[in-house]
Image: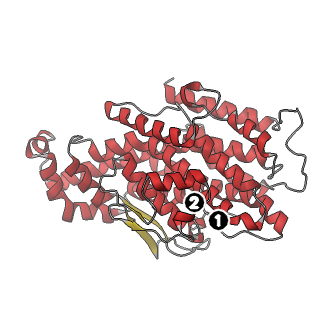
Amino acid sequence: MDNFGRVVGFILICNCVLSACKPRNSRGSTLTDNKSLVFDDSKYQPFLKDEQAILSNESTHRVTQNQRINRAYAVAAKRLNGLMNCAYDKTNGGQTTFQANWFHFGVWASRQAGDMISGKDSVLLTTLKSSGIGALRGAIGEGLYRSLGLKSDDELADKLFEIVEKELAAGNLHLAVEILPPTTRFIELFKDNCKPDLGTAEEILKGQFVFYNKNPNPLGIHDAILAAQRFVTKFGKGAKYNGEFQDLLYHAFHSYLQAMTITDPRKVDQRVELILLGNLLIGFHEQMILQTYIQDALGSLDSASTVYKSLMTKVLMILKAPKERVGCGMDVEPGLKVFDVSRPLPLTPQKALATFEVPDLKQIASDFKIVSVAPGASVWTEYDQRMKYISGVFINEQTNASLGSSPYRDFCLP
């Protein structure tokens, strides 16, 4: 069994163990003391079969696998928001305004990948053939072009698209296997008391993740981001993330946990910021995992050519999300909002970014210079460029309730 298989097996064992027993605090009592603050998760249980199939590493066609991932992400988005809103809503007698968690974005990014994997998004291939392929052929050079045995530019376009499809599918599955289990564990740990004692909950949460160099405590957020940045430099040498450290994931769910325990309406801005911080930190971890797949997808024919990678970014890297809320049973195609990642993204936040109250969030905004604009990612293979742009999307769209739409017309969640 390879390392990836061992990681999947370990995750499944952990899930089984955690689902069989209730979490306990350091004094031996359970975390279910507050009976009134229970998140009823029963209505989502029938929808967990997709996640179970993904984690069992069941062999299936990559299109089917992508659809399972999209559905599992949609369920995780609903469950996670339900848990994080539970205490606030029950304390204040009403529902909070929509705040997207990472999975709300993940659904639509994965669905866009699925459209490419399935060949449904033929517009990108047509665009590649009609406007981008001549420049790409020049970027890879005639020598490499001839060595590939290609007879036409159309064949080059088909080959490039085939490489992108393959790497997207592999990266999408790797990410799902990494990100779904800790989310499920987080929900199972705290759904019986959605406003736990924060100190006790923090210690329990630490036990769910592997930290840098197997330390008992995680790196600080700033150091964890630096470690991720250093880690991706290895991927150009053929290395691949395989569960080495999850410090960023820990801090992401710790931010979600802090947001979950805030019930004072006067602190709603802080709650919103903590959710945003959690989204960003999962984003840093996500893009670390995907680095090798993105490099192989966009730079496999000529890894030394920045011109080639830049052209592939402009032609192929488009993110689509629903522009307006789409009801169950409705087609999600009309009115899609399109993000061109190669162009700068002006920020239109709910409040001035300079007034962020959460120090770690303010630091990230400063470090990545996303105070007023998220620079376009001219070369999508560059980790820092991707994170600057993704940060802007997260900031702009966190209150966009259309992200909560179902990814498929025949998949309706309660």
**Quarter where residue 206 is shown:** top right
Which element type, helix, strand or loop, lies under badge 1?
loop
Give the quadrant of residue 313. Answer: bottom left
Residue underneath mark 1 = 412
The answer to whether 135 appears left or right of 125 in the picture is left
**Disc ID at residue 69:** none
Rendering coords of residue 27 (x, y %)? 88, 33
Q: Which residue is mark 2?
A: 104
Amino acid at pointer 2: His
- Residue at x 52% of width, y 42% of height: 222
Amino acid at pointer 1? Cys
Q: Residue at 19% of width from left, 65% of height from top?
A: 131
Of badges 2 and 1, the one in the foreground is: 2
Closer to the camera in the image, 400 or 330: 400
Looking at the image, residue 294 sits to the left or right of residue 60; the answer is left
**Distance (Cα) linking label 2 and label 1:** 15 Å
Q: Nearer the viewer, residue 64 or 75?
A: 75
Report helix, strand or loop for mark 2. helix
Observer able to see residue 46: no
Residue 155 pos. (x, y %): 19, 52
Residue 285 location (% of width, % of height): 51, 43
The picture places residue 111, in percent across and down from the top left corner, at 48, 58
In the figure, residue 113 lies in which quadrant?
bottom left
Identify the image quadrant of the C terminus. Answer: bottom right
